[in-house]
Image (cartoon, rainbow, N blue to C red):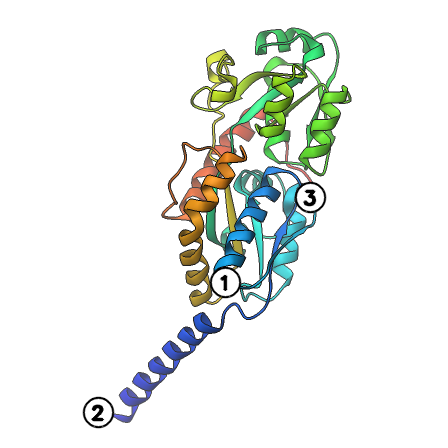
């Protein structure tokens, strides 16, 4: 055997040894999970459930850190400033990634700068919700109401689905509506209940269902391929004349691109081990869609499919490009 072949063989063995050592030694310190929204929303709850189960598996603290703002981007940007070693991760709701890259420059490229390492489940479908004092119960009545005043709606960031769906309704009905910036779901729910907001387009949740059951909210449309069990009498958006707006929105843990492959594989493998328990817990909390119970084969392909869908939706909403 030539000296060169011996060198190549030894080098390969050394690289394999390093990769194994990375798996054995990782994690050796606490892990941070960045969340770009306030505590109490779906993204935050999903992150905390995942963190709890992974702490149990790894025997190492996994700590959720909230950095609300920028439609979830502040948490992602913080992760990207840290070393790409798997010790700083970010929980994202993928519905926030595609639109912002179409409409603006958020300061990173998710296709190049991040890699998906864990799937928690699909977010519950978006619903159009009004304060029950409005007496509005469907989109036809909503249109009539919108012609009597300038309605305001919540948007936890520019270019997030809440903003896009609100602008879509405004464009579809040909009336002016005002988006009001928020940093998270809990304050949105409070302000809708108190009448500060006229309506919201938001993922359904336990808070939405509780307020609807108490008669405080009317859920007037579901953005989904099928009715939602909690609102069995509420028709989908498509059934009321607006179709083409359904897009999967997944809760995914992201790592920075460049994280060692061995670490990425370990996080994915261990997350799959915990997934059944975590999925069941999130389902019971009303945070995820129980019908979407399959771990995706490719995060990247799903993200690209979402990007294509969001491009079509944004074209219909007629939202213009926005500043970063």
Q: Is residue 221 above or below residue 126?
A: above
- Along the viewing direction, whichever of 161 and 61 lies nearer the viewer: 61
Considering only vertical position in the picture, is 83 above or below 102? below
Q: Residue at x 56, y 23 (%)?
A: 127
In this rendering, the answer to whether 186 lies above or below 105 is above
Q: Quadrant of the N terminus?
A: bottom left
Q: How dense is the environment of label 2, judged by Cα within 10 Å: few (below 14), some, or many (20 and up)? A: few
Tell me, yes or no, whether the two marked residues, 3 and 1, touch with CB atoms within 8 Å: no
Left/right placement of residue 34 relative to residue 225 reads right
Q: How many marks?
A: 3
Residue at label 3? 70
- Of tags 1 and 2, the one toward the viewer is 1
Mark 2 or mark 3, earlier in chain:
2
Residue 136 percent across, percent down from the top left: 64, 9
At 56% from the left and 65% from the top, the residue drawn is 84
| Label 3 Cα crowd, 10 Å radius (few <14 / some 14-19 / many 20+) | many
Instruction: Tell me where residue 4 appears, x and y as whole percent.
Output: 30, 89
Mark number displayed over residue 1: 2
Residue 82 rendering spot, x and y as whole percentages: 63, 64
Instruction: Quarter of the image for the C terminus: give it.
Output: top right
Of the two numbered discs 3 and 1 on the same chain, state the one appearing first in sequence.
Answer: 1
Q: Secondary structure at mark 3?
A: helix
Q: Which residue is mark 1?
A: 58
């Amino acid at each position: 055997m030539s000296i060169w072949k011996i060198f190549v063989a030894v080098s390969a063995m050394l690289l394999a040894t390093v990769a194994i050592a990375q798996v054995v030694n990782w994690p050796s310190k606490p892990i941070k999970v960045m969340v770009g929204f306030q505590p109490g929303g779906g993204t935050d709850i999903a992150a905390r459930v995942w963190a709890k189960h992974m702490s149990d598996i790894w025997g190492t603290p996994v700590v959720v850190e909230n950095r609300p703002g920028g439609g979830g981007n502040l948490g992602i940007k913080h992760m990207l400033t840290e070393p790409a070693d798997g010790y700083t991760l970010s929980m994202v709701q993928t519905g926030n990634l595609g639109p912002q890259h179409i409409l603006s420059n958020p300061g990173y490229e998710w296709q190049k700068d991040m890699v998906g390492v864990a799937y928690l489940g699909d977010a519950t479908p978006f619903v159009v919700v009004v304060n029950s004092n409005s007496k509005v119960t469907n989109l036809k009545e909503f249109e009539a109401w919108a012609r009597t005043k300038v309605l305001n709606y919540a948007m936890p960031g520019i270019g997030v689905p809440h903003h896009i769906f609100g602008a879509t309704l405004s464009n579809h009905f040909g009336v002016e509506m005002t988006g009001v910036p928020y940093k998270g779901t809990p304050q949105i729910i409070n302000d809708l209940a108190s009448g500060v907001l006229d309506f919201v387009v938001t993922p359904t949740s336990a808070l939405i269902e509780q307020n609807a059951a108490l008669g405080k909210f009317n859920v007037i449309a579901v953005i989904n391929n099928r009715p939602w069990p909690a609102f069995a009498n509420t028709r989908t958006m498509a059934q009321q004349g607006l179709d083409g707006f359904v897009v999967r929105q997944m809760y995914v843990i992201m790592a920075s691109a460049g994280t060692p492959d061995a670490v990425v594989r370990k996080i994915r493998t261990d997350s799959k081990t915990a997934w059944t328990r975590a999925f069941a817990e999130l389902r019971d909390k009303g945070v995820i869609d129980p019908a979407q119970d399959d771990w995706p084969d490719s995060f990247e392909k799903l993200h690209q499919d979402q990007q294509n869908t969001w491009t079509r939706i944004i074209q219909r909403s007629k939202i213009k490009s926005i500043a970063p």
